[in-house]
Image: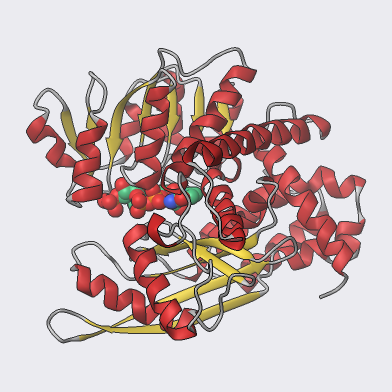
C-alpha cells in the first residue's frame, strides 16, 4: 500500500534514509503511518506540531560494549543496546532480547512497537527495548551470569524504577533477569523494581511468567466471541516453544482448544493427539534441550526439520509465538486454504505485511502483536505497581486484571477501527487507539 498523504510519504522516505539497512524498523513504521492517515485528516495538529516527526525518532539510543570472560578464560566482546523510544506517558518499558540476530534495527522496531502496545494496556508506561547479539544457547550458567553482569554494569547507568524498567524477551527469562537484578542492586545499593519478570522471592509478580501467553488467549477468545466463535473444539498450531508459546498452549487448552504443533528454531513437532505440554516444559524450561527430543518419548508424533512448514498443518487457529516475519505470504495462503479462521500474534511482528494482507482479504480474524501480546508488558506494569506499594497480589488477582486488560485492548482496538471506517481491521484499530493517548500527551508536553 502506498501513502495517500504526501507528508507521510516524505516522512517514510526520511525514516529509510536516516535508518539505512534497518528493514524491520521500516516495516513497523510504515504500518503505523498507514494506519494514522485517517487520524491526521481529522487532527492535522499532530503533523503541524511535529508529533509524528518526533514519534519516529527515538528519544535516546544507547549502544555499548559488553566484554565478558568465557569458561576457557577467553575474552568475548558483544554489543549491547537500549533504545529509549518514547516516554510521553510513562517511564520507558520493554524487554531485553539476547539473540545473535540482534542489531540496532531489530531493537528499534521492537521499541517503536512497544510505544503503542504499552499505551494500549491503559497503564502509564512509555516505550523502550534493548538487548544484545550475545547467544545464550550452548553457554554455561556461569558464562550467562558473567555476560549479564557485564551487560548490567553499563545498562545500570541509564535505567531506574522511574526512568526505564527493562524485562525479558527472547533469550531472557527468570535466570537472566535474576543475574541482572543482582548486579544492579550491587552497583547502585538500591532495592527497587528496576526490572520486571523477577523471581517471586525478590519482588516478582505472580502470573508474570504466564502473562503473555495467557493474555494472547484472552485476547483471541474475545475476538472469537465477538465473531460468534470460541476456542472450544478448535485445532490450534503454535510456533515457538519458549515462554510465550508454552503458556499460550496451556491457556488455549484450558479454553477448550487442542494444540497439535509447536516448534523451535530447528524444526517443529506435530502430535495429532495434542501436544503433551508437561513434556515440552521439561525439555525447554528445565533441560534446555531441542524440541526434536519430544519424539523420543512420543513415538506417534512427527518431527520435521525447518520451521516454516508448521503453517502447512491444518488448523482453525494459528498463534505465531516465535519471532518476527515467521509467517510469509505463502504460509498465510496455506493457512487460509486449510480453513484457518483466526490468527493472533504472540511474537512481535511475526506476519509479513503480505501475510497480513492475505488474512485480512480472506476474512481471517487477525489480532496484531501490539494488541494481542500486550499481556506480558501489562503484567510487568502490574509488577511495578506491586513493587511501588511493597505489596503482592495473589495469582487470581493478577490474572483477573490481565484478563480485563486484554478484553479492553480488544474492544478499544475494534472500536477505533470502527470509528475510523475500518471495521474489523484490528491492525489499524490497535495502531490508532495506541497512538491517540501518546499523541495527546506529546501535544500537551510541547516541543521537547
Ligand atoms: P523465548 O526465548 O522464551 O522463546 C522463543 C522461541 O522462539 C523459542 O522456541 C525459539 O527457538 C524460537 N525462536 C527464536 N528465534 C527464532 C527464529 N529466528 N526462528 C525460529 N524460531 C525462533 O522467547 P519468548 O517466548 O519470550 O518470545 C517469543 C516472541 O514473543 C518474541 O517475538 C518476543 O518479542 C515476543 N514477546 C515476548 C514477551 C514476553 O513476555 N516474553 C512479551 C511480548 C512479546 P530456539 O529455542 O531454538 O531459539
- Give whichever of 243, 160 is nearer the camera: 160
Which quadrant does the N terminus fall into? top right
Side (left or right) of 256 relative to 298:
right
Which of these two is toward me, 171 or 25? 171
Question: Based on the displayed image, in which of its 4 quarters is residue 294 positioned?
Answer: top left
Residue lying at 60% horizontally and 12% vertically, measured from the top left: 228
- Residue 390 screen position, x and y as percent: 56, 60
Q: Tell me: 407 left or right of 259.
A: right
Q: Is residue 310 above or below residue 169?
A: above
Residue depicted at x 29% and y 66%: 135
Coordinates of residue 50 in the picture (x, y in percent): 84, 67
Q: Based on the displayed image, in which of its 4 quarters is residue 187 positioned? A: bottom left
Residue 294 in view here: yes
Residue that appears at 80% across and 57% down: 439
Vertical relation: 420 (above or below) 326: above
Residue 348 visible in the picture: no
Asked if residue 272 is positioned above or below residue 305 in the image, the reply reads above
Count of number-bearing discs? 0
Scheme of colours in the image = secondary structure
Say left or right for 125 vs 236. right
Q: Quadrant of the C terminus?
A: bottom right
The answer to which of 186 and 123 lies nearer the viewer is 186
As drawn, the residue found furthest toward the front would be 391
Residue 252 lies, in percent from the top left, at: 42, 27
Amino acid at each position: 500500500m502506498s501513502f495517500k498523504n504526501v507528508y507521510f510519504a516524505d516522512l517514510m522516505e526520511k525514516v529509510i534514509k536516516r535508518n539505512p539497512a534497518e528493514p524491520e524498523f521500516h516495516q513497523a513504521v510504515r504500518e503505523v503511518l498507514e494506519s494514522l492517515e485517517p487520524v491526521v485528516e481529522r487532527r492535522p495538529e499532530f503533523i503541524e506540531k511535529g508529533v509524528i516527526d518526533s514519534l519516529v525518532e527515538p528519544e535516546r539510543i544507547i549502544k555499548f560494549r559488553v566484554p565478558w570472560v568465557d569458561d576457557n578464560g577467553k575474552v568475548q566482546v558483544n554489543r549491547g543496546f537500549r533504545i529509549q523510544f518514547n516516554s510521553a506517558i510513562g517511564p520507558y518499558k520493554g524487554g531485553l532480547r539476547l539473540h545473535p540476530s540482534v542489531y540496532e534495527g531489530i531493537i528499534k522496531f521492537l521499541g517503536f512497537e512497544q510505544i503503542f502496545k504499552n499505551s494500549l494496556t491503559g497503564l502509564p508506561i512509555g516505550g523502550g527495548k534493548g538487548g544484545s547479539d550475545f547467544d545464550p544457547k550452548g553457554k554455561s550458567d556461569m558464562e550467562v551470569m558473567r555476560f549479564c553482569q557485564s551487560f548490567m554494569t553499563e545498562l545500570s547507568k541509564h535505567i531506574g524504577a522511574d526512568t526505564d524498567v527493562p524485562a525479558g524477551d527472547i533469550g531472557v527469562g527468570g535466570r537472566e533477569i535474576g543475574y541482572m537484578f543482582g548486579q544492579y542492586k550491587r552497583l547502585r545499593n538500591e532495592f527497587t523494581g528496576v526490572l520486571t519478570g523477577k523471581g517471586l522471592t525478590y519482588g516478582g509478580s505472580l502470573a508474570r511468567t504466564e502473562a503473555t501467553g495467557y493474555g494472547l488467549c484472552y485476547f483471541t477468545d474475545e475476538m472469537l466471541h465477538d465473531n460468534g466463535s470460541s476456542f472450544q473444539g478448535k485445532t490450534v498450531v503454535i510456533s515457538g516453544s519458549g515462554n510465550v508459546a508454552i503458556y499460550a498452549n496451556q491457556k488455549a487448552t484450558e479454553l477448550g482448544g487442542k494444540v497439535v504443533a509447536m516448534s523451535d528454531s530447528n524444526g517443529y513437532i506435530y502430535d495429532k493427539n495434542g501436544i503433551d505440554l508437561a513434556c515440552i516444559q521439561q525439555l525447554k524450561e528445565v533441560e534446555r534441550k531441542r524440541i526434536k527430543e519430544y519424539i523420543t518419548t512420543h513415538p506417534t508424533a512427527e518431527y520435521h526439520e525447518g520451521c516454516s512448514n508448521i503453517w502447512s498443518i491444518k488448523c482453525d487457529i494459528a498463534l505465531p509465538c516465535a519471532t518476527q516475519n515467521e509467517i510469509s505470504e505463502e504460509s498465510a495462503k496455506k493457512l487460509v486454504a486449510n480453513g484457518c479462521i483466526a490468527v493472533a500474534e504472540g511474537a512481535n511482528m511475526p506476519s509479513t505485511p503480505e501475510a497480513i494482507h492475505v488474512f485480512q482479504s480472506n476474512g481471517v480474524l487477525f489480532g496484531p502483536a501490539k494488541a494481542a501480546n500486550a499481556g506480558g508488558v501489562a503484567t510487568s506494569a502490574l509488577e511495578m505497581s506491586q513493587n511501588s506499594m511493597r505489596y503482592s497480589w495473589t495469582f487470581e488477582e493478577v490474572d483477573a486484571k490481565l484478563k480485563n486488560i486484554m478484553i479492553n485492548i480488544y474492544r478499544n482496538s475494534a472500536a477505533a477501527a470502527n470509528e475510523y471506517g475500518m471495521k474489523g481491521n484490528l491492525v489499524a484499530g490497535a495502531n490508532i487507539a495506541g497512538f491517540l493517548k501518546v499523541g495527546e500527551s506529546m501535544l500537551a508536553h510541547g516541543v521537547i
